[in-house]
Amino acid sequence: MNGARVEFRGLRRRFGSTVALDGLDLTVEPGELIALLGPSGCGKTTALRCLAGFEQPDEGEVLVDGADITRVPANRRDAGMVFQSYSLFPNLNARDNVGFGMRVRKVPAARRHARAQELLELVGLPSVGDRYPHQLSGGQQQRVALARALALEPRVLLLDEPLSALDAKVRVTLREEIRRLQLSLGITTIFVTHDQEEALSMADRVAVLRDGRLEQVADPATLYDRPATPFVAEFVGAMNHLPGLVSGDGVTVLGQTLPVEGRAPGTARADVLVRPEAVLVTPVDASGAEGDGIVMVSSFRGSTARLRVRLSDGTEVLADVPGHDSARFAPGTAVRVGLVDRPVLVSARSETGAAAAVPEPDVV
Amino acid sequence: MRDSRTRSKSRWAAVPLLVFVVIVFGVPMLVLLGGTFTKEGTLSTANLTESLQGAYLTALLGSVKISALVAVLGGVLGTFLAQAVVTSRSRTLREAVLTASGVLANFGGVPLAFAWIATLGNAGVVTTTLGLGGHGWSLYNFWGLTLVYLYFSIPLQVLTVVPALDGLRPQWREAAQNNGASTWQFWRYVGIPVLTPALLGGVVLLFGGAFSAYATAQAMVGSTVPLVTLKIADALTGNVLIGHENVALALSLDMIVVAGLVMAVYLPLQRRSARWLR
């Protein structure tokens, strides 16, 4: 299979008074896996459905390898799609589900069955061909759906939150398998998800959407380390909002002056956005020296533990410490708090000057 | 220990239902079987044999014929109406049709017959207004009775089929399109096969409704149209021949066998449909 280049150009789509897509421009390179990430209603599924042909944009174009397919009927587009769930035909067994597209194209039964079996083996289900959807687990059903989507050797694979209905363990296994398959087949893949962990772990690039517009498209590391906007910073990963004072090219926060990533806001008072892993905490030793704050909550997460620390001015800060060190940071422990010396993202502070709420330690 | 005590209590709770079933179903069944296989005080299959001959057989076949016709016509028309309601996406239309169907599907017996007689009988409002009598119109024959039976059968099919049509997931249609299928191919390979058990289940219900109908036919056509339910009434009341009460019981047994065969087709289909549309 060869991947195709996919372009969304100025795509707009309205549903009544709701604007689902508001001029989306995005290019997906051949063989690339791009994740469309964003909160509910941001337009990611609408964009995918416009590419699949299930929605017609009000304005704009969808191009595949330079050809405008905006008005091409859904059944004539060279794109395989895996839906959220329950999309297998209930009256057909797994083999016939996979072979459905070939049946429609009148491929002889023997060839169809052989190809369907090949695909079932490819997705790790060599022995379920005779089973009906209701006899398969959720994970197996999605694998069969993936095999069905690949059966016609499409040049674009569309995944519409295919893992959202599965339990956590199956989700992790299946996402790794999807990625392995995608890389081995070299198929251009667009993956819609609202799960940032899924997006960051699978995609070559992640496109963050908000209110039908593209906020940022970048590789996962860039998106995480250098978010282009406060929305992206907030949406991808956990983030502290700390009060800071801008002066020259730097910002003073928690008593340290750090360089500013990108452009500093015009105001003196600012929100400094800092990841929990960029916050350094050390327990105050037994000498009785006063700390900067007190550990309120400690959530053990295996390799790390996430602390919620309340500073003396009432500001709450999330900080990550190594998991094996978590015993030193029991709730009530006095700690010193500092920041890793690297550029930080700064946004204009709200009128009230209040720090934005920090998410709970166990909610990332 | 507690589990077995709870189970025991549950069993006792079912006793009133069992008593009810024995009284209204078990006892009449025994009487029916006893009467069917008794002729002049001795064990015999003569009543059963007689119920399958002559006028009785004609009536049995007449009932099967009108029931099959009503089931097929009602099934097809009801399905089209249900599909129109489901695809219209109009909540008001849907609620109006479903409410009306709920009422009309239960409109039967003598009131239904008189409603039709008053409307399309020989002196009915529509018949006289449009002068239908002059064109050979009569409600009191096989086709008139079929029309009246359809009046409650079509709404019954709508009520049966709408949930099945609702159960057709939009993802199936989209997945079919995504695999290159046209609308017709979707219906051929997925839609119709998935719906078939529910559609046939509805048709079977319509058959049963028409097969067991008595009061409407009695009020409308009397003995003009041979029907097994009318024959049973005649035999029980000695309307034509006296001493044929046990033949009436044998005819009832024939009906039970026909209904049993119909249910034997319906239940597995219904189970399969429920599994697919879950």
Image (tube, rainbow, N blue to C red):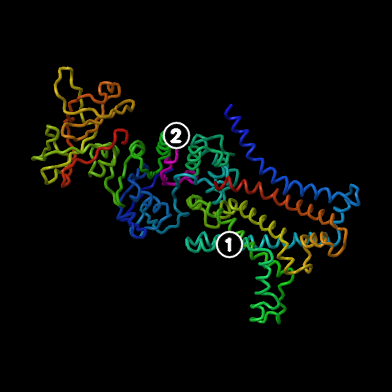
| Residue A83: in magenta span | no
Q: Residue at x 42, y 54 (%)?
A: A53
Helix, strand or loop status at disc 1? helix
Where are the magenta residues, as a range?
Answer: A149-168
Between A174 and B185, the one lying in front of the other is A174
| Disc 1 residue type (three-letter) | Ser
Image coordinates of residue A263 in percent, x first then y, are: 15, 44
Does A8 sit left or right of B272 as displayed? left
Residue A348 seen in render: no
Between B106 and B192, the one lying in front of the other is B106
Residue that carries the numbered disc 1 in the rendered image: B101
Q: Locate the N terminus of chain B by quadrant.
A: top right
Does A249 sit left or right of B126 as displayed? left
Residue that carries the numbered disc 2 in the rendered image: A170
Please, is residue A321 above or below residue A287 in the view? below
Please, is residue A27 above or below residue B140 in the view? above
Between B78 and A332, the one lying in front of the other is A332
Helix, strand or loop status at disc 2? helix
Which one is closest to the eye, mark 2 or mark 1? Answer: 1
